[in-house]
Image (cartoon, rainbow, N blue to C red):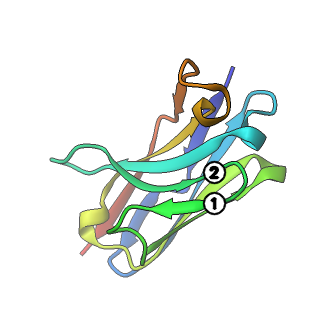
Amino acid sequence: QVQLVESGGGLVQAGGSLRLSCLASGGNFFQIADMAWHRQVPGKERELVATITSNGRTNYADSMKDRFTISRDNAKSTVYLQSDNLKPEDTGVYYCYGTLKERFGRSYPDYWGRGTQVTVSS
């Protein structure tokens, strides 16, 4: 029973920072899972922010690289998204994602958290 629970969202002024957290539960899922952050802003489709593999390899969407940093702490079963220089257009719901597909194959499911709201005021 894998569960992903996001936290750390809230209201911040433009130019400010937030660190989002995603706590994973469910056996040793987190230790072997590839993780990611996605977001959905009003009026747009859900989009990828960043990914991090089970062994710590990171990738970012082209537009996210300079302001977002993904990391993980396997001892805490937690993945983080450090979000800096936030802009009003960053406002939206940020979702944690995890998968075992790379390790075990495409028959394994994707897991999503319920999301955490980020609101950036101008």
As drawn, the label of residue 53 is 2
How many numbered discs? 2
Q: Quadrant of the N terminus?
A: top right
Q: CA distance from mark 2 to mark 1?
A: 5 Å
> Is residue 60 rendered to the left or right of residue 25?
left
Q: Is residue 108 above or below residue 36?
A: above
Find the residue positioned furthest to the right. 75
Tell whether label 1 touches label 2 (CB within 8 Å). Answer: yes
Across and down, in percent, residue 112 comes to: 50, 33
Which amino acid, mark 2? Thr
Q: Secondary structure at mark 2?
A: loop
Three-letter amino acid code at the position of disc 1: Arg
**Circle 2 crowding by C-alpha within 10 Å: few under 14, some 14–19, many from 20:** some
Residue at figure coordinates x 23%, y 43% from the top left: 45
- Answer above or below: position of 65 versus 31: below
Left or right side of 57 for 38: left
| Mark identifier at residue 79 | none
In the rendered view, does 10 fall on the left or right side of 89?
right
Residue 54 placement (x, y as % from top left): 70, 48
Identify the element where label 1 is drawn. loop
Q: Write down the quadrant of residue 60 in the picture.
A: bottom left
Image: 29 above or below 116: above
The tag on residue 57 is 1
- In the depicted structure, whether residue 63 falls above or below residue 80: below
Tell me what residue is drawn at x 74 percent, y 27 percent: 26
